[in-house]
Image (cartoon, rainbow, N blue to C red):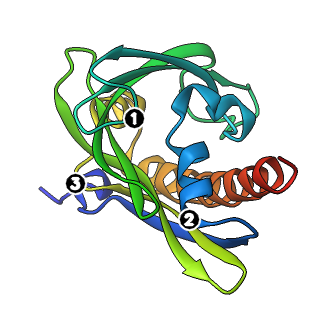
Amino acid sequence: MTQSIIDTSPLFELKADIHISATPLEVYSVVSDLPRSAEWSPECRGGTWVSGEPSTVGAVFRGENLRSEDVVAWAPLVRGVWHTECRITAAEPGRTFQWMMLTHAREDQESIWGFDMAPDGDGCVLTHHFRMGRATAGIHKIVADLDEDDRKRFVADWTAKLEQDLDATLNRIKAVIEKQ
């Protein structure tokens, strides 16, 4: 039996950078305020902290998301409003802010999103990154009824979507911060 592309690790590993005319601490104060994510995220419409001290390691955030019908339209994705939970895994003001996506039972998954800030001239470089080691429960559900060719197509199409999301997020954060 051959291994599925879904068993590849890492399944996704992407990053993108942008220069922002603000200090790393100013950028950190915005990106670590996850309830504000509706201002920059292509899918997250904000949410609430459900446990722990907001924006600190160990805190859990419940996000409300909205996905349109045209996002990888052929794939059996969750559409409309849906919710996720994540746990903060790194929170170093002016340096890094990261979170791990959780299962519905609040178990860890190898799906980590984050932002890193580095001083650069009159501002900073903001790096947005995403890494999925092993496929999450959600990915397994999406591909459960797909043959291997469609699984490969899904990974390729989802990678392209993630690349667009990282770039869109960075451009929106830059706009939010630079007009403050």
Residue under pointer 2: 24
Residue 131 location (% of width, % of height): 36, 58
Residue tagged 3: 7
* Location of residue 6 in the rendering, given as x and y in whole percent from the top left corner: 30, 51
87 over 28 or under it: above or below: above
Nearest the viewer among 155 and 55 is 55
Total numbered circles: 3
Q: Position of residue 77 (x, y in %)?
A: 54, 27
Question: Residue at 73% across / 26% down in the picture?
Answer: 68
Residue type, numbered disc 3: Asp
| Residue contact between numbered discs 2 and 1, judged by CB atoms under 8 Å | no
Q: Residue at x 54, y 18 (%)?
A: 47
**Amino acid tagged 1:** Ser
Distance in Å between CA atoms under marks 3 and 2: 37 Å
Seen at 62% across and 19% down, the residue is 79
Query: Which residue extends farthest left?
Result: 1
